[in-house]
Image (spheres, coloured by chain):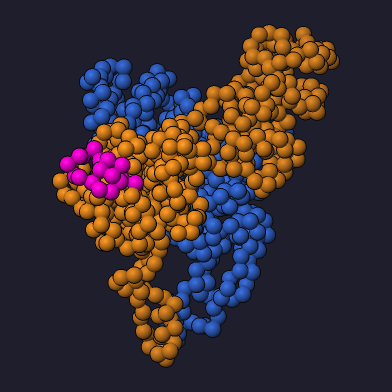
Chain colours: A orange, B blue
Amino acid sequence: MFVDFLYELRKHKVKVSAHEWKALMEGVALGLHDSSLDGFYRLARLVCVKDVAQYDAFDQAFLSYFKGIGADSLALTEELLSWLRDPKKLRDLSEEERAMIQGLDLERLRELFEQRLKEQKERHDGGNKWIGTGGTSPFGHGGKHPGGLRVGGAGGGRSAMQIAGERRFQEYRKDVVLDVRQIDLALRGLRQLGRDGAEEELDLDETVDETCRNAGELEIVFRPPRRNRVKLVLLMDVGGSMDPYAELMGRLFTAASRSGRFAKFRSYYFHNCVYDSVYEDAQFRKRVPVSELISHSDRDEKLVLVGDALMHPAELLDPGGSIYYVQGQRTAGLEWLRRLGQHFRRAAWLNPEPERFWPGTTIEVISSVFGMWPLTLDGLASSVRYLVRGGERPKLGEKASSWARGWMGDDPSGSSGN
Amino acid sequence: MSSTFDQFQGTESYIVSDELRHAVNVAVALQRPLLLRGEPGTGKTQLAEELAQALGMPLLRWHVKSTTKAKDGLYVYDTVARLHDSRFNDGDVKDISKYIKLGPLGQALDAAERVVVLIDEIDKADIEFPNDLLLELDAMRFRIDETGRDVVAKQRPIVVITSNNEKELPDAFLRRCVFHYIEFPDRELMQKIVRVHHPDVEAKVLDQAIETFYGLRATPRLRKRPSTSELIDWISALRKAGVDLARVGHGIPFLGTLLKTEHDVELVGKRAKA
C-alpha cells in the first residue's frame, strides 16, 4: 500500500526506511489515520519524518504524490455511513441547529452525498454545493452548514493538502541556514577522543582491582579524562570576492576557536589562493611561510580551507600569478595547494559559493587537490565526517571543462597511486 | 474512531494542539517512543507529566545531563558502597543485588503496572548515548550483568523523549521513534493557554498582551525569543502592577520578564525609538 509514496519520499531525500514503513502500515491497520487524507498526512509525518528540517521535503513529496486527489472526497466510507446512522454524534449542535437537521432526512442526505461524490472530480474549497473544505454545502469539513456532514479531518481544521501546500516548515530546511550554534554542533562531530595528559579522574574499576590486590586496603587509581585529540589548522580566504561571506566566516571562526574544543587550533589567512606564505592576521602583516607551516604541523592534523576558490585561472596556474606581483613567485598557486594537500592526510575545502556556480571555474581545478564541500550545514557535517573517518570525498569535475581538466592531472591524495 | 485510541485529550491545566494530541495517541497505539522537539518553553517536559496524570499512570523521570551514560538509566552498581561495607563489615556484602540500584528506565521496565517514562533532554548527553539505548527501547528488556538477572517489561511503558533541537540524533535511534515537532502556539492556542493560568483576565487586556508579545517575537535577530512561560509571567506582572497596556504609548513595561539578554533589550529599545 502506498509503496510509491515511500519512493516519492525518498526521491525528496526524506530518509525513510522499511522500519518506518512497517510502522506506518501498522498505524494504518490500527486505523490511526482516521480514514482520511488529513489523518494519513499526520500519521505519515509522525512516523516517517524525524527531523523538522525534513518537514518541508515531506510536504513537497506529499503534495506531488497526492496532487489531483480531491482532498477529502477520498475519505472514509464505513465511518461516514455509521455516522449517518448515529445522529447522537451531532450533539454539539444547538437546539436551533438540531431543528434544521430535522429538515434534512438522513436517507436523502446520504443519497445526495454519494451522488455528489460521484459527480465531483476535483478538490473543492468554499462554495455551497460540492464536498470539500470551508464551504456551506452540507458535506465536507471545516464548513458552516449546521446540518452538514463533516467528511474527515477536524471541524474547522485545515486539510492536509492545505497544510502541505503552505510549506510552513520551509525555513527549517537545513541547506539554507547556518548560525554559530549550528556550526558549533556540526563541529562537535570533529573529535577523536583519547586519554592524554594529567591524571585527574578517579578510575573506579582499577581502584577496586588494586584494592583487592592490596588485601582490602584502599588503593586509589586515577586516570586522565577523555579529551578531544583533534588538531585543526584553519586557512581562511579574506578580502575581495570573499567580502559578502565575511559574517559567515566570522561565525565559523567563532565556533571553531571556542576554547577547549580542539587539542590544538591554529588559523591563518590568505587572499584568493595560497602561495608561498599565509598570514596570522587578516591585515597580512605577520607572515608565515607555507614551508614553515608544513614543517610545524603533524601529518595527522586536520587542514580546513575556507574560500570561494574563484579567481582568474592565471592566479592559480601561472607561476607568479599572484595578484601581489611584488612577491616574485616562481611556483604556481596550484602547486602550493598540492604541497599542502600532500602533507596533511585529511584536508577539506569549504566553499561558501553556491554549488550551482561551481562548474567551469577554478573551483573544479582546486577540487582535484582538496575535497570540496559547500559551506552549509550539510556540507559542514559531511566534511567533518570525512575528516574524522575518511572515506569518499565528493567528486567534482567529471564534467569539467577541457581547460580545467588539463590542469587537474593526477589526484595527489590517491586513486592514481603515486 | 475507537475509544482506546484517543486516550489523551490534554488536561484542564495543559492545553494541547490537535497535532500534538494526535502524535501522543499514535505513539501510545504504536507502542513506540515519542520524540518531541521544539523551541524551549513549548511544554515538552510538561507533556509527560500531564500524560501520566491523564492516563492515571505513575511517571518516572530521567533528566539527562552531559555526563549521563545510557547504563545509568537502567541500573547503577554501587561499587563504592560495597567496598565500604566490606571494609567495615557492614551489611551482607555477598548479596550483590543489594548494591544494584535501578535507574528510571530500569524501574519502568521492572514495574508491575504500565508507567510513563520521561527521558528529558536526551541531546545533552554524549552523541552516542541514544544508540546505547536502542536495544532496551526496542525489546523493552535488559540484563543486569552483575547478578545475571533479566529484567523484562511486563507491559511496555510509554516513553516520552524530549530534545532541544540541539544536535542530530543517530538515524538508527530516530527510526524507532514517533517524531513530533512542537510548533510555537499560534495566537488562538496561546489565548487558551493564558486563560488556564489567568482565568479572570479581561479579553481586551489579553488581546493586547498577546499582540505585543507576538510583535516582540517577530523582532529580527533576537538572541532568545520570549516563550510561553515568559508571557504568563509578564501578564502576572502587568496585572499585579495594574498597568493598562493601552495607555502605555511606546516601550513595553516590565521588558525584563520577556527578554533575558542585554543584547535583546538594547535591540528592542533601538527599534522602538526608530
Instruction: Indicate whether B256 appears above or below A194.
Output: above
Q: Nearer the viewer, residue A227 or A340?
A: A340
Q: Which residue is drawn at 63% across and 19% down?
A: A142
Magenta region, main secondary structure = loop
The answer to whether A64 appears left or right of A338 in the picture is right
Residue A282 in view here = yes
Looking at the picture, how far across and down is residue A275, in whole percent? 26, 47
Q: Which residue is drawn at 46% across and 48% down?
A: A382
The answer to whether A169 appears left or right of A93 in the picture is left
Q: Nearer the viewer, residue B15 or B67?
A: B67
The answer to whether A5 appears left or right of B59 in the picture is right
Q: Does the magenta stretch include residue A323?
A: yes
Quadrant where the N terminus of chain A lies?
top right
Looking at the picture, how far across and down is residue B208, in whole percent? 37, 20
Looking at the picture, how far across and down is residue A347, in whole percent? 39, 53
Instruction: Indicate whether A301 appears above or below B253.
Output: below
Residue at the extreme left of the image, as rendered: A285
Q: Which residue is drawn at 23% across and 46% down?
A: A329
Q: Which residue is drawn at 40% across and 49% down?
A: A369
Q: Does the magenta stretch include residue B56?
A: no
Residue at the extreme bottom of the image, as rendered: A215
Which stretch appears magenta?
A: A318-334
Quadrant where the C terminus of chain A lies?
bottom left
Residue A161: which quarter of the image? top right
Q: Which of B251 and A385 is in front in this view?
A: A385
Residue A236 in view here = no
